[in-house]
Amino acid sequence: MVDRLVTIMARLRDPIGGCSWDLAQDFASIAPYTIEEAHEVADAIERDDMADLKDELGDLLLQVIFHSRMAQEAGHFALDDVVTAICDKMERRHPHIFCETVGDPDAPPPRPWEQIKAEERAAKAASGALDGVALGLPALMRAEKLQKRAARTGFDWPDASGPRAKVVEELAEVDAATSPDHQAEEIGDLLFAVVNWARHLGIDAEAALRQGNAKFERRFKAMEAKAGTEFEAMTLADKEALWQSIKSRAD
């Protein structure tokens, strides 16, 4: 079935009879759609909607096919190379499963996952601990990955009290900011500190914010439903009272 999708994409990218929109795309123009589709997969999982998840996984697969087709046209690689590369990587990173010496009591223990990944980064000429953290990641997720990388070198707070104090410090620096640009910079530092605090508490900041977004959306819609057509005309004080009423209910 994947071959059918590959054939469809080749037809869409055909210079003579293909789709003008698909032909106009390149890696940079398609990348935002790839990110969007990954988020829509996560959204379907969050909603436990298996029918939607099936569709969204198809959309994400199409992105892989699209990028691979453009790369093949440019002479870089093809879909088969992508599949081979990920198969090789999975086997390489799971020597305790795929190594030929599995079950041999005299064989040395397999290298741990993180050591293998570090060796792979070194092979790519990555010179620093933070190299290779993708720029396209959501900001909260990338902050956490940067912090984890730094922590491996020993640059980390010993417990959650350090990053908590840093959050308080950064709040004061936001208040003391003297210009919009300065304020934006300090807000960035504050968000980074909050992610660090969450990490030390064992909380995934990206997931926590998604939950916070969902809670706000759920409560706000409940406000609109309760107030009906009068909602927008209500005073801020009345809206706040309504919000507190909705909030007091169990979510």
Image (cartoon, rainbow, N blue to C red):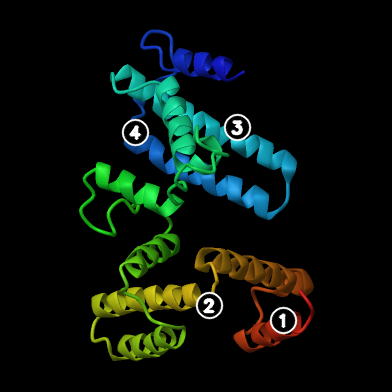
Question: In the image, which is nearer the foreground, mark 3 or mark 1?
Answer: 3
For the point 44% across and 37% down, the residue is 92
Q: Residues within 10 Å of mark 3 (few under 14, many from 20)?
A: some
Under mark 1, the amino acid is Lys
- Per the rendering, the mark at residue 58 is 3
Under mark 2, the amino acid is Leu
- Asked if 160 appears above or below 228 in the picture, the reply is below
Under mark 4, the amino acid is Phe
Please tell me which of labels 1 and 4 falls first in the chain.
4
Measure the alpha-carbon separation of dots 3 and 1: 38 Å
Residue matched to label 1: 247
For the point 28% across and 20% down, the residue is 74
Measure the alpha-carbon separation of dots 3 and 2: 36 Å
Measure the alpha-carbon separation of dots 1 and 2: 25 Å
Residue matched to label 2: 201
Q: Residues within 10 Å of mark 4 (few under 14, many from 20)?
A: few
Measure the alpha-carbon separation of dots 4 and 2: 38 Å
Question: In the image, which is nearer the foreground, mark 3 or mark 2?
Answer: 2
Residue matched to label 4: 27
- Asked if 16 appears above or below 180 in the picture, the reply is above
Q: Are marks 4 and 3 in contact (CB under 8 Å)?
A: no
Q: Nearer the viewer, residue 73 or 92?
A: 92
Q: Please provide percent x and percent y for residue 131.
A: 27, 54
